[in-house]
Image (cartoon, rainbow, N blue to C red):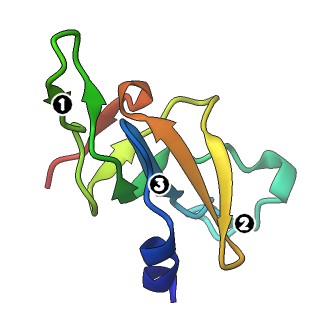
């Protein structure tokens, strides 16, 4: 279902479309967490990337992440995008703090 949405939406330039991981709703001890006490999830999966940005001399600088990468996001920022009733976020490549390696 989500695959169809990405055929209709492609980020431009150095933008990266991500899907945040789901917030933890239960502690390791089994206690249910209310929505207010759940922290903002800073980990996400890259769903789509733009072609890159133009450098000073006109060459294209590719985006540093690829589809499927697990990344760390800043606490604030990003633009919320709804695609087929699912919430995603757009970030600039330079706003991404890092990526996880396997």
Q: Indicate which disc, 3 or 1, sits on the residue closer to the N terminus.
A: 3
Q: Nearer the viewer, residue 6 or 45?
A: 6
Residue found at x 51% / y 90%: 1
Q: Indicate which disc, 2 or 3, sits on the residue closer to the N terminus.
A: 3
Q: Outermost residue toward the front?
A: 58
Residue bearing the label numbered 3: 18
Check the image and report above or below for 24 versus 4: above
Q: Is mark 3 in CB contact (under 8 Å) with mark 1?
A: no
Q: Nearer the viewer, residue 56 or 42?
A: 56
Q: Image check: 19 left or right of 59?
A: right
Q: Outermost residue toward the top?
A: 56
Q: Quadrant of residue 24?
A: bottom right
Q: Image check: 92 left or right of 69?
A: right
Q: Whole-percent x and y of residue 86?
A: 66, 72
Residue 31's disc is 2
Residue 60's disc is 1
Q: Quadrant of residue 54?
A: top left
- Secondary structure under badge 1? strand
Residue found at x 64% / y 29%: 76
Quadrant containing the C terminus in the rendered view: bottom left
Mark 1 surroundings within 10 Å by alpha-carbon count, few (fewer than 14), some (14 through 19), many (20 or more): some
Q: Whole-percent x and y of residue 38?
A: 73, 50
Mark nearest the camera among 3 and 1 is 1
């Amino acid at each position: 279902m989500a695959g169809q949405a990405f055929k209709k939406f492609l980020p431009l330039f150095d933008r990266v479309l991500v899907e945040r991981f789901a917030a933890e709703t239960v502690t390791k001890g089994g206690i249910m967490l209310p929505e207010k006490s759940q922290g903002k999830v800073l980990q996400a999966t890259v769903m789509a990337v733009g072609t890159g940005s133009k450098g000073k001399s006109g060459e294209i600088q590719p985006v540093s992440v690829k589809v499927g990468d697990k990344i760390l996001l800043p606490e604030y920022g990003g633009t919320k995008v709804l695609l087929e009733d699912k919430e995603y976020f757009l970030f600039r490549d330079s706003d991404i703090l890092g990526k996880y390696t396997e």
